[in-house]
Amino acid sequence: MVALMKYRAPCPGMALGIIDANMQSFEEGTAALESIRMDKATPRSAAAAGTQSIERAMEVLRFVASAHHRGARLTDVVDALKLSKSTARRLLGALARSGMVEQNPDNKHYVLGEEAWVLGTLANGRQRLLDAATDSVTRLAKLTGDTAFLVIPRGSYSVCVLREEGSYPIRTHLLQPGGRHPLGISAAGLAILASLPDADMESALQANAAVIAEHYPRVQLARVREMAAQTRRDRVALNPGMILEGSWALGVAITDKQGRPIGALSIAAIESRIVGARQESLSALLRTEADTVMQRINTL
């Protein structure tokens, strides 16, 4: 799971102040996004072109978020999203004018802007989960010495929102805040997937089938279904190096009062630190902390 920086959102009062200060630039940026035209090679109606431009801009924003503190170059966006250079430049420019991304003047890399953090902070339900889970993530990392995560579901994907490094010197480096995988691929994503009703679980797998086949060649959907069934029995998900050989992880879902998954806690480490008796002790610790988070979130 890639070397992550720990994310803590700014306080809501600060967020509101930033919004007031930046409202004009945000509106200008939004207007710019809506004015972006599609490449001439794919003519469409104005409405359809505008909608697709916004969808593309959101894809760019998510990609920049996944790059986190390192940032993303223009060429990274072009290559990853299969955009023309001119289209990528226009989209990044519009996002920058709205405050959603910023460009580092030293290396020209794009990172998330202030406005992106503001909007994230105002997503109050997610903030409540972050507030409830932060201490547990910190405690997991301190007690185990390994890397601990808070992950949330986003459509048919799981997204990392918090990472805490442990003291053990050898770490796995695959995930950082903003990083995402299809549900069922990571330990946290598998824990979330297994907490869904059967129909929703299958819908998520089918929605991601093409992406999994292309980008996760080590993973077979039939195997994910088997692992989800085991996760339901054990109340802990095991990722035995599905993404990268030797990089293992355990995850436990966090659910709301209706039993719907709203997140997951996970621990990642090299294989030798997950197998055997230690796997049982880590699993028990994850279950305890997940229960603690669920109790806390109902009091916030």
Image (cartoon, grey):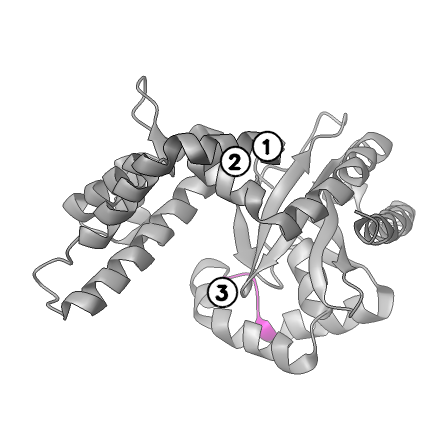
Q: Any magenta on residue 219?
A: yes
Main secondary structure of the magenta stretch:
loop
Q: Which residue is mark 1?
A: 13
Which x, y percent locates residue 253? Answer: 76, 58
Tell me the element at label 2.
helix
Q: Residue at x 80, y 65 (%)?
A: 257
Q: Which residue is mark 3?
A: 212
Mark 1: give few (<14), some (14-19) or many (20+) Cα within 10 Å: few
Which x, y percent locates residue 49? Answer: 19, 64
Judge depth for marks 3 and 1 and give the one in front: 1
The residue closer to the viewer here, 56 or 203, is 56
In the rendered structure, which amino acid carries the disc numbered 1? Gly
Q: Residue at x 22, y 69 (%)?
A: 48
Q: Is residue 244 left or right of residue 277?
A: left
Q: Are marks 3 and 1 in contact (CB under 8 Å)?
A: no
Q: Which residue is mark 2?
A: 16
Relative to 45, residue 288 above or below: above
Which x, y percent locates residue 105? Answer: 30, 19
Query: What quarter of the picture does the N terminus occupy?
Result: top right
The disc, 2 or 3, on the residue closer to the chain's N-terminal end is 2
Q: Is residue 2 left or right of residue 271?
A: left
Mark 2: give few (<14), some (14-19) or many (20+) Cα within 10 Å: some
For the residues labelled 2 and 3, the Cα–Cα distance comes to: 39 Å
Which segment is the magenta one? Answer: 217-221
For the residues labelled 3 and 1, the Cα–Cα distance comes to: 41 Å
